[in-house]
Amino acid sequence: MIMLRQIGLGSLLAVALTYGVVAAAPQVPEERLAFPRVENGLGYAVEFTNRGQPRSTDLARQYVAAEKQEDKRDIRKKLSDALSQQFDAHIKQQQKELEDLEKQIANLRSVLQKRIGAKSTIVERRVEQLIQDAEGLGWNAPGGLRHGYDAGTVHPLTVPVDANRFPKVP
């Protein structure tokens, strides 16, 4: 119960600190953003485009509003080109993310192979650590507050509750 309370308080503190950092962060004006916000008539951001590119939603509206087939054909071509550029940028970003993930996987494979090769050393070091802890020669002194109790042990801050002291709730 105490542990749950500590976790809850820790989470609440983390959220409060995060909110304070975010609230204190300087706000970047929208005109300085690489991808300015595009809003529909209701004020919701619906699309992000690069500067200089015609916005696809505006082109789609122009297409619907155009009366001549020749105008519709030109606007459709511009819309197709704009969407093709946006798609290419999206694919480029996905390829970069994939390359980053592949690097992470390669690093994890390398570390895993090192750990497999050093299994006996790692296990022996852990055996020594557990034995020293059991003998009172570990990092935490005997009787101090420790984390990670074995099953059946009592936390030093836990006080047994006398069931007779508290009335039963109906």
Image: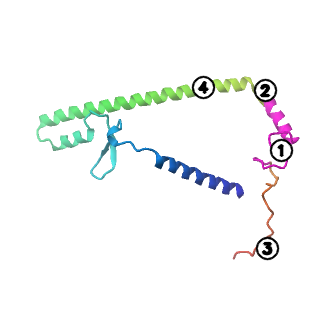
User: What span is in magenta?
Assistant: 123-149
Q: How crowded is the residue under tag 4: few (<14 C-alpha within 10 Å), some, or many (20+)? A: few
- Mark before the other along the chain sequence, 3 or 4: 4
Q: For the residue carrying disc 3, how many other residues have a C-alpha within 10 Å: few (<14), some (14-19), or many (20+)?
A: few
Provide the secondary structure element on which disc 4 rests: helix
Which residue in the structure is indicated by mark 1? 141
Taking depth in this image into account, of 82 and 155 the one nearest to the observer is 155
Q: Mark 2 to mark 4: distance in Å?
A: 21 Å
- Name the mark on residue 107: 4
- Front disc: 3 or 4: 3
Type of amino acid under label 3:
Arg
Secondary structure beneath dot 3 equals helix
Identify the residue at horizontal 23%, vertical 41% (top origin): 58
Across and down, in percent, residue 62 comes to: 18, 41
Give the residue pinned by disc 3.
165
Residue tagged by mark 2? 121
Dot 3 and dot 4 residues touching (CB under 8 Å):
no
> Which of label 1 and label 4 is nearer to you?
1
Would you call the spot at circle 1 few (<14 residues within 10 Å), some (14-19), or many (20 or more)?
Answer: few
- Image location (x, y in percent) of residue 117: 73, 23
What residue is drawn where x is 39% and y is 29%?
91
For the residue pair 5 and 76, the one nearer the viewer reads as: 5
Q: What amino acid is found at the position of numbered circle 2 in the picture?
A: Thr
Q: Which tag, 1 or 3, sits closer to the chain's start?
A: 1
